[in-house]
Amino acid sequence: MPNLIVCGEEVRSNPDGLVSLTDLYAAAGAAGMADGKRDPRRWKLQDGEQFIAFVAEQLHVPQRDIYKTSRARADRGGGTYAHWQIALAYAKYLSPELHMQVNEVYARAKSGDVTLADEIADKASPEQQAWLAKRMNSKIARSKLTATLASHDVVGRGFGDCTNATYKGLFNGTKKEICAAAGVEYKKGKSLRDLMSVDDLIATSMAEMVAAKQIDKFNVRGNAACADECERSARKVAGLLQ
């Protein structure tokens, strides 16, 4: 889930998609909605434990997977993060007005309202804005390549093979190998591009655009042949960028 803007404040989500209750509490406090209300830790102990247990039971997961508290580190902020159902319950506890705002923002996020992304970008640093711009360009290049692959008889795991071929050509490894080398947990559903630098996003976009043009130009067809062309195009781009 993308970060949300509530009461004019950013409410973060962690890589697992859990929402920051710490940020919700801070946003409510800044808006004068948290007077006399408990912070996330005390709320869990005195009010939220039963609901958290119920959500965990319904999802068939341990509570630790949907409610996490961590200390701040140099590379990430600490605080309490929870499943969105728990975040909505906590917002309701803090204030009916906050509850309504969180509901509306969450609905916009789930519906893919792009104006929400624009509001978030307005609050980002110049470095974050530059990364976001390149990430959006990367999505466009990826969509173009995916459409080209589909029209050239790529099916099933062939799409993943083409992605890994691009990574091999650019970074000398598959997604799994790159994650292992960087000490990052490998997850099939998690995009490696969310972790890339601006330079790596640009390189990946260029490689995918070149691959799409080459596949069209030479009418390359099938999983194996298209994966080979993706790797070949990526190596050309890597050579140009050296």
Image: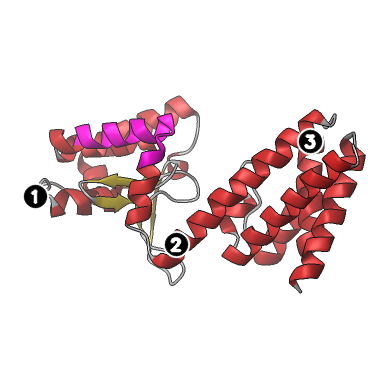
The residue under label 2 is 128
**Location of residue 127 in the rendering, given as x and y in whole percent from the top left corner:** 45, 67
Q: Residue at x 24, y 39 (%)?
A: 90
Q: CA distance from mark 3 to mark 2?
A: 31 Å
Q: Quadrant of residue 6?
A: top left
Q: From where the camera sits, is residue 174 visible? A: no
Amino acid carrying label 3: it is Leu
Identify which residue, 98 or 134, lies in the foreground. 134
Q: Residue at x 22, y 50 (%)?
A: 8
Residue 107 drawn above or below residue 142: above
Mark nearer the N terminus (2 vs 1): 1
Identify which residue, 178 or 203, lies in the foreground. 203
Q: CA distance from mark 2 to mark 1?
A: 29 Å
The residue under label 1 is 32
Mark nearer the N terminus (3 vs 2): 2
The residue under label 3 is 149
Residues in magenta? 99-115
